[in-house]
Amino acid sequence: MEKKLQSFILFLKYVSLAVLTGVLVGIIDAVFGRGLLAISDFRMEHYLFLIPFLPLAGLLITWLYYRFSETSLKGMTLVFETGQKKREDIPLVLIPLVMSGTWITHLFGGSAGREGVAVQIGATLSHALGHRFHLPKDSRIMLITGMAAGFGGLFQTPFAAVFFSMEVIVAGKMQYHALLPALIASYTAAFTSHMLGLEKFYVPLQDAVKISDGSIAVRLVVLGIIFGLTGRLFSFLLAQLKKFFGENLKNPYVRIGVISIPLALILLLLYNGRYSGLGTNLISAAFSDGNIYTYDWILKLLLTVLTLAIGFQGGEVTPLFSIGASLGIVLGEILGLSQVHCAALGYAAVFAGATNTLFAPVLIGLEVFGSNDMIPFFIVCMIAYLVNGNKSIYGAQEVNG
């Protein structure tokens, strides 16, 4: 009887802390997300005056981290190591550091995302709450709960956020024990951030890709293979460039200060900063009949990898969405499929190929584009996941078995 009572009390703690985590992370996500959008708009208007200062911005970011918390430079690796029980604490100072570092990166034109920031914020906060309220030290539940809240609050795709958090720490092993608190926190964070003015990206597709014959199925498989290899290429280049710069330019100030000079020049000269920032301009163009060049996806991929490899802050997921969407437009024309539908499939499947996850990308597709293409999303994301070869943008991700 006493054990049942203790289990019930622990359950109530998890549920209560899931709600609290969702509210707090939703508020921070709203501040971070809306601030980032305002900064991006400002940079687009004044790119000529801002992008040239990218090297100085990089030096400032590096100084902030080495001045206040060098450990926080590990970013998402801290989250993974904590989830894998290799470390006990994530410094709370990581939250303001990663937020300010990402804002600075985007203000001065670095090509980066935002998802990693939100996940780090959520995981750091929830982990601290777990310690504060004396939850089991060996439990991943609060960490996964915070990750789901961070992802769900920023992108407002709560169901995808839950499965991403449960499957990404150890690839091939779902952390189902965290399902309920993660679901509560994710939906609470999404609701909170939405009430505070953060809008969801949503493009409901009116029709569907009908698999009427073997030819369509084959083309979907081809899409999956190409999108998966693209995600794998992103992961491979990111890991190799980080290793190369780490070995050959060991001084972080020299690394970010020197390499960002040609990076800034390239970003400025290539279509007036077209490949700076999140890549939402490419996503908008893909789904609003805008201008997509055949090389947009590869340029965005290379410049994002370079930006992150030398030490700028931000995530990878939104650039991955833009890479997949712009590549989908190109492949749709080549394969004789609807370009918009291929862009939607690429949006989800390149994410699958780069993160070594399956269910979260499928759910991203359904939550952003509707359920009409449920079967194509599953086919293409599954193929992308299979050809990925257990490569991931998260170097600390473990593989089960």
Image (cartoon, helix red, strand yellow):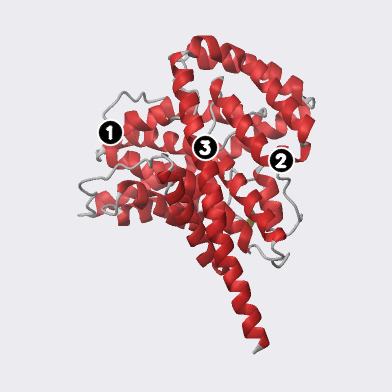
Residue 170 in sight here: no
Using the numbered discs, state the Cα–Cα distance from disc 3 to disc 2 in whole angstroms: 17 Å
Using the numbered discs, state the Cα–Cα distance from disc 1 to disc 2 in whole angstroms: 47 Å
Relative to 401, is 198 on the left or the right? left
Mark 3 Cα within 10 Å, few/some/many (few <14, many 20+)?
A: some
Amino acid identity at mark 3:
Val
Looking at the picture, how far across and down is residue 34, in whole percent? 47, 34
Mark 2 Cα within 10 Å, few/some/many (few <14, many 20+)?
A: some
Q: Nearer the viewer, residue 64 or 209?
A: 64
Label located before the other in sequence (3 or 2): 3
Amino acid identity at mark 1:
Glu
Residue underneath mark 1: 333
Relative to 174, is 285 on the left or the right? left
Q: Is residue 124 above or below residue 133?
A: above
Q: Secondary structure at mark 3?
A: helix
Using the numbered discs, state the Cα–Cα distance from disc 3 to disc 1 in whole angstroms: 39 Å
- Report the residue at 71% width, 40% height from top: 93
Relative to 85, is 180 on the left or the right? left
Residue underneath mark 3: 31
Looking at the picture, how far across and down is residue 303, in whole percent? 54, 25
- Report the residue at 44% width, 54% height from top: 158
Residue underneath mark 2: 93
Q: How many marks?
A: 3
Q: Nearer the viewer, residue 355 or 121?
A: 121
**Residues tagged 3 and 1 counted as in contact (Cβ below 8 A):** no
Q: Nearer the viewer, residue 342 or 311?
A: 311
- Report the residue at 73% width, 28% height from top: 64
Relative to 2, is 391 on the left or the right? left
Mark closer to the observer (3, 1): 3
